[in-house]
Image (cartoon, grey):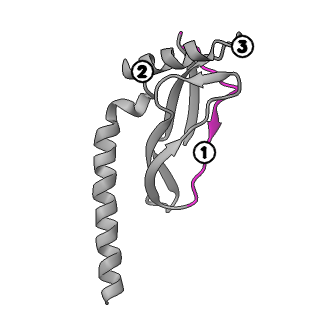
Amino acid sequence: MFIRFELEDGTFLEDESFERYYDDVGAGIETVEAPDGYEIIGENTYAVEISRDESSNLVADPSEVTFQVRPVSSSGTSGTESSSAGSTASSGKNPATGDHAPMVLAALAVLAAFGVGITSKKQRS
């Protein structure tokens, strides 16, 4: 899973981007911290599902998530920043996967229920 950060003008912060590795199959909601000197605009979470491909390699879906960030002002206007962050979050500026979050979360719930059913059936046998 590749985590990318971009400024409001679309400039990517390549030095701040990183890769997150997973060691098992599963699904969930992950949290990302903003790089030093920046704050994330909107949500700092994403939904991910880890599965195995036909070669048994772990594969993340989505394979990349982009978060929009802005520099944190060092002038001590934290009250102003937090209120503007709240208004930005409510205007829909979320990570690239945010548009599909309800659909992904519904799919994750179905997968989780299916997994619980299989586990329950195996324990009874």
Residue 70: name its quadrant.
top right
Amino acid carrying mark 1 in the image: Arg
> Mark 1 or 3, which is nearer the eye?
3
For image coordinates 60% across by 45% down, the residue present is: 20
Mark 2 and mark 1 lie on one chain; the one further toward the N terminus is 1
**Residue under numbered circle 2:** 93
Of 32 and 21, the residue lying toward us? 32
The mark total stands at 3
Q: Is residue 97 left or right of residue 8?
A: left
Q: Residues within 10 Å of mark 3 (few under 14, many from 20)?
A: few
Residue 51 appears in the rendering: no
Mark 1 and mark 3 lie on one chain; the one further toward the N terminus is 1
Residue farthest to the front? 79
Residue 47: name its quadrant.
top left
Which dot marks residue 20? 1
User: What residue span does the magenta drawing correspond to?
Assistant: 9-23
Of 79 and 22, the residue lying toward us? 79
Residue 125 percent location from the top left of the image: 31, 90
Amino acid carrying mark 2 in the image: Lys
Report the Cα–Cα distance between label 1 and label 3. 29 Å
Q: Is residue 113 left or right of residue 82?
A: left
**Residue under numbered circle 3:** 74
Report the Cα–Cα distance between label 3 and label 2. 23 Å
